[in-house]
């Protein structure tokens, strides 16, 4: 059967955009929106030449009847909203040029000098962008954040369901479509990918994302957090939790789950039938947070207390007048007042709810509750308040007493490892300084690198030790560490393992992704993903310096990690940025404002 997706070249002014995907099965407005993303020319100003008989592509045109052929060249006429040239499309050989163009056009408030330095970092793996299919930036940003979870990609890779329109189960179709999309996002040398298959699966799974708005009837902007929740809910019904042979055997011996659980889970993954016999799923194994809440009636005449245990996949950060930091907002969300029926009073009453975290996930998602309903204007308006967030988050103070007790040993071991790393770094620093003082010109360059690595390790360990010992501020909230994450400072190379790998939970998380919103209302504006890049590869076989202080493997790994910048994924425009710029996404104006955060667990 012939495919409906064609590849065309679009010429505009003095630029040519090759390999533009045109799906004749989709409304023409999708293609016009793609051209808007590439050139900045609004659909209303677009005139497209090159069609037989002088036909025109309008928003309501049927693309399948216009005679457009694969590899055809079209010419676009029209001026952009802001009369500036569009960014040159990225190619495998022009990544640095593409980043520079994005700096000029899309990040006027960012530190160009810092970003230019980041561009020179070697071996940074930059993923492709995603084409905006017409107000789909919310979906693009969510997909780019999910792509930073390798365990999720692995679970999707084991899924064997089909992705075509003939798949009747909408959850199965969405799962297979996301699997295919993430697979394409991890192919290097591709500038941008057309996510038409996945957006179609998402709109089939939930018609809310197919809503149209405006006089032109274009697809409406949607809430990225709602998209995040919808995707995870669908995946939870199709992806079983990864079975570990040793754990499955132990569970079978203890009688908590049948010995066939691992096999059933594997079979479920292969045929797309569900989440396995044990009822667990990959989503909750990666993002699930078990909370324990105690509700106490505060009205006179009632002393009722109700305890509940729930599983959530996102922590909320409430934003009120007293909230200035992420810890303040988390504390406000975990201690709130609610209305609930009191059996003793026989009516609705006021209750105080105090929630604590009992089990922690490998990945911690946080949502800033930034949209509030304004009844007069009848719009979900945005709360612009500046709420800072850290690169390293410690949720120990938000946990139950039982959870804290389980983490005590691991936290102590992590602290000792950090102290040892700081001591080693100090020794290296002294040796490097002694070498420099001695005037050993042959080792000056290596010594300088060692000084940087050693100083970073020592500083990071000292910051973490201070954070462990300092009393919680803000009325018992977690002390916030706004320094660089531990793994960029060197000590984590020996102290901390991966999010879901071996090691024990410490309650400490590192920031790996930020999803921002720019605009004033939930049904408008623009979403962008900012993700932490993978550190450049370290050549373990490289010879050590012949003279001067010996390099340790930990310091080399630390230097590589500290060189890892952040990546800004603005639909099909991809550029490098820095952690310092990411921390500026805390709100307070009309610039990009953090809406969701994704943290990865550090294990001892």
Image (cartoon, rainbow, N blue to C red):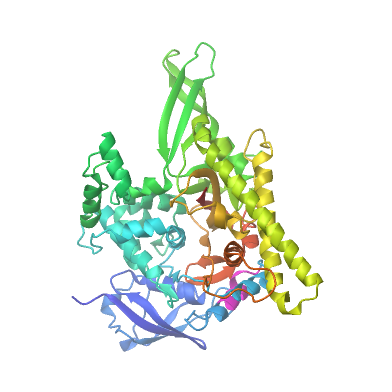
Residue 442's place in the image compared with 428, above or below, is below
Q: Position of residue 508 (x, y in %)?
A: 55, 46
Residues in magenta?
A: 99-108
Q: Position of residue 253 (x, y in %)?
A: 26, 37
Residue toward you, 317 or 409: 409
Work out which quarter of the rendered image holds the N terminus and state it.
bottom left
User: Total marks drawn?
Assistant: 0
- Residue at (22% x, 57% y) in the render: 270
Residue toward you, 116 or 170: 116
Instruction: Answer left or right for 321 relative to 198.
Output: right
Residue 354's place in the image compared with 539, above or below, is above
Q: Main secondary structure of the magenta part?
A: helix
> Picture quarter containing residue 308?
top left
Instruction: Answer left or right for 54 relative to 117.
Output: left
Instruction: Answer left or right for 425 relative to 495.
Output: right
Specify whether residue 319 is in view.
Answer: no
Q: Is residue 160 magenta?
A: no
Q: Position of residue 368 (x, y in %)?
A: 54, 47
Residue toward you, 2 or 530: 530
Q: Position of residue 135 (x, y in %)?
A: 44, 63
- Residue at (68% x, 73% y) in the render: 446
Outermost residue, front direction?
A: 547
Specify whether residue 130 is in view.
Answer: yes
């Amino acid at each position: 059967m012939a495919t409906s997706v064609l590849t065309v070249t679009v010429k505009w002014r003095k630029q040519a955009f090759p390999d533009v995907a045109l799906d004749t099965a989709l409304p023409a407005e999708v293609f016009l929106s793609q051209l808007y993303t590439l050139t900045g020319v609004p659909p209303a100003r677009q005139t497209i030449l090159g069609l037989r008989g002088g036909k025109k592509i309008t928003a309501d045109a049927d693309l399948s009847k216009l005679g457009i052929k694969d590899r055809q060249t079209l010419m676009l006429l029209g001026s952009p909203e802001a009369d500036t040239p569009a960014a040159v499309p990225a190619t495998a050989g022009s990544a640095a040029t593409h980043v520079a163009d994005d700096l000029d056009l899309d990040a006027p408030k960012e530190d160009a000098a810092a970003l230019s330095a980041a561009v020179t970092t070697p071996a940074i793996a930059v993923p492709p962008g995603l084409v905006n299919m017409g107000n789909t930036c919310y979906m693009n940003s969510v997909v780019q954040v999910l792509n930073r979870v390798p365990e999720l990609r692995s679970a999707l890779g084991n899924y064997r369901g089909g992705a075509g329109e003939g798949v009747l189960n909408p959850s199965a179709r969405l799962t297979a479509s996301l699997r295919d999309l993430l697979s394409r996002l991890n192919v290097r040398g591709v500038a941008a990918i057309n996510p038409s298959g996945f957006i179609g699966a998402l709109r089939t799974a939930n018609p809310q994302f197919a809503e149209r708005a405006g006089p032109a009837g274009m697809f409406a902007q949607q809430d990225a957090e709602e998209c995040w929740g919808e995707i995870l809910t669908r995946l939870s019904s199709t992806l079983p939790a990864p079975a570990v042979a040793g754990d499955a055997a132990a569970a079978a011996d203890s009688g908590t789950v049948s010995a066939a659980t691992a096999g059933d889970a594997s079979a479920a993954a292969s045929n797309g039938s569900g989440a396995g016999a044990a009822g667990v799923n990959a989503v909750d194994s990666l993002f699930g947070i078990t909370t324990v809440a105690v509700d106490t009636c505060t009205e006179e005449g009632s002393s009722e207390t109700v305890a509940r245990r729930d599983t959530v996949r996102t922590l909320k950060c409430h934003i009120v007048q007293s909230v200035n930091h992420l810890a303040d907002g988390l504390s406000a969300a975990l201690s709130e007042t609610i209305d609930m029926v009191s059996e003793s009073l026989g009516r609705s009453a006021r209750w105080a709810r105090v929630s604590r975290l009992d089990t922690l996930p490998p990945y911690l998602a946080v949502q800033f509750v930034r949209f509030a309903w304004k009844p007069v204007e009848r719009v979900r308006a945005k709360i612009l308040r500046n709420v800072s967030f850290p690169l390293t988050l410690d949720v120990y103070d938000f946990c139950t007493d039982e959870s804290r007790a389980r983490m005590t040993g691991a936290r102590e071991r992590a602290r000792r490892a950090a102290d040892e790393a700081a001591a080693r770094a100090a020794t290296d620093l002294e040796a490097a300084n002694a070498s420099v003082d001695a005037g050993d010109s042959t080792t000056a360059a290596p010594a300088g690198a060692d000084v940087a690595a050693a100083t970073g390790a020592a500083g990071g360990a000292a910051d973490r030790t201070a954070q462990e010992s300092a009393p919680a501020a803000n009325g018992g909230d977690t002390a916030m560490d706004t320094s660089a994450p531990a793994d960029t400072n060197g000590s984590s190379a020996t102290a901390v393992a991966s999010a879901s790998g071996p090691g024990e939970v410490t309650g400490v998380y590192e920031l790996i992704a930020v999803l921002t919103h720019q605009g004033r209302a939930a049904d408008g504006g623009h979403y962008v993903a900012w993700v932490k890049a993978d550190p450049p590869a370290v050549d373990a076989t490289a010879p050590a310096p012949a003279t001067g202080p010996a390099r340790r493997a930990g310091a080399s790994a630390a230097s590589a990690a500290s060189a890892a910048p952040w990546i800004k994924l603005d639909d099909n425009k991809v550029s490098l940025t820095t952690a310092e710029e990411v921390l500026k996404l805390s709100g307070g104006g009309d610039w990009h404002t953090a809406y969701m955060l994704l943290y990865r667990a550090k294990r001892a």
